[in-house]
Image (cartoon, rainbow, N blue to C red):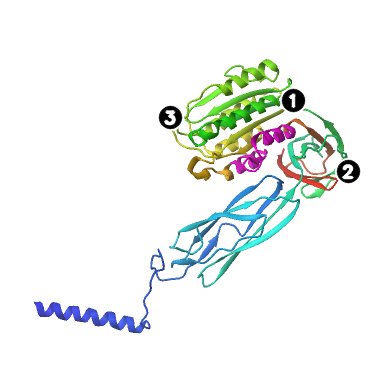
Amino acid sequence: MAKNNIKMVMMVLVSLLFMTACSGGSTTTSNNTGSGVSGTPDITASKSTVDFGGIVLKNSADNTIVVQNKGNADLVIGNVTHPASPFSITSETCSNTTLNPTESCYIYLYFKPTVQGVYESLFSIPSNDPDLSSINISVKGHGNSLSTWIDKVSTGACPGPDISVNAAVDDPNGTDLTSLALSNFMLTENGTVVDSSRISLSNLQQTPVSVVLAMDWSESVTQITTTIANAGKYFVDQLDQADEAAIWRYNNQIEINPITPSFVVGDDLGKVELKAFIDKLMAIDPGTKLYDSVFQSIDRAAMGSKGKRVVIVLSDGVEAPGSIPSTIKTIDEVINHAKSKGIPVFTVYYVDPTFKGGTWGNPQLLQRLADETGGKYYNSQITDLTTVINQIFKVISNNYTFTYKSTSSCNGTLTFGLNVNYTGMLGDSTKTITLP
């Protein structure tokens, strides 16, 4: 019996040696944390082009590239190159990394223009993909001196609907832009310039607003609640007596003022009430009900009696589960709710630099929330909170209205673009609506 076992072992060894010889004597080895799977690596990137669009000077935008190995062998990635300024890679997990099949790594991009102009650059991701030794990712964007925002597009009766485009223009450096002429603007509809002779321009300043301020008061901002409170009180000071406001504060709990009625009038008595609410002690409770708070704020703003209704969110952009049960909304539900109610959401990103080394936060979520609801995104890491609040109030309070008769049919999608040029200072904004 023992002799038979020895013969079987010898036969197996001979077979293995024969197979190795036939394959040229080589064996497959894994590199770093590789899986050792024989086959071909296949590198893919979530985007080949990143377009940041128009970013106002003293502001910024973020984006993320996801790199994945969709092959069936280890993907070995070399040093990722960097795009030229004002683009940058703030952090990444791809350089000198081996990805097993289906694994991913991430590249975090940042655009911060300091001079007005158009910018383009690219960066490369080298790898051992036999079909594509290096992926080139192009990045582009432009820096604007003027903050421009299309607030609302209204349509009249068909055929050939009457179009009214409401927009605001502001210079963060304080230039008075309340008396611009039609020659300072270019309006487009589905990419075609609308002849200025067809446009009637009116300028209605200081449009009353119904505004809800939602402030993050969670554990991640413990050391800067005084800064947040001061920004909130500065917000209150900007209210005109024709405005109306409400305030949300949230962590694992949600506090509201007023509970009833829906809003506080922006007169002296109303300002005292709102500031007292901001100064009231709120316990720091682990958990952040960002989505629920913004969803509720949208509902409250929709109850507003003024012609312009908005929500302003001060947050680090992180939704964190807490211990108190609640109806948890998703970011998609919040965005769709704002769109259905016609409420633009302005978002202001800020972080506590002492919490987790200042790396805690999700600016891209706040960018998405603003972009997809028709609001605007601001980064207070670059510009202080009170300056940002001041800029937002200028944008939401001032209005230019462009009225003309469209030649488009009364169904389908219309995309409006507005370009502004005042003594060489530029700004732009777009908005898309669906008819009927």
**Residues at marks 1 and 2, CA–CA distance in whole angstroms:** 27 Å
**Most distant residue in the top direction:** 269
For the residue labelled by badge 3, is the local secondary structure a helix, a strand or a loop? loop
**Is 393 a magenta residue?**
yes
Q: Quadrant of residue 264?
A: top right
Q: Count all numbered tags in the image, as a single digit.
A: 3
Q: Give amino acid for label 3.
A: Pro
> Which residue was labeled with disc 1?
208
In percent of the image, x 52 and y 73: which residue is there?
A: 130
In percent of the image, x 57 and y 19: which residue is there?
A: 259
**Most distant residue in the right direction:** 197
349 over 252 or under it: above or below: below
For the residue labelled by badge 1, is the local secondary structure a helix, a strand or a loop? loop
**Residues at marks 3 and 1, CA–CA distance in whole angstroms:** 37 Å
Indicate left or right for 66 with 86 as reference.
left
Foreground residue among 390 and 39:
390
Please rate how many residues cluster around mark 2, counting C-alpha atoms within 10 Å: few if below 14, some from 14 to 19, many from 20: few
> Which residue was labeled with disc 2?
183
User: Bounds of the magenta span?
Assistant: 366-395
Is residue 352 among the parts visible in the rendering?
A: yes
Q: Give amino acid for label 2.
A: Ser
> Which residue was labeled with disc 3?
325
Q: Give amino acid for label 1.
A: Pro
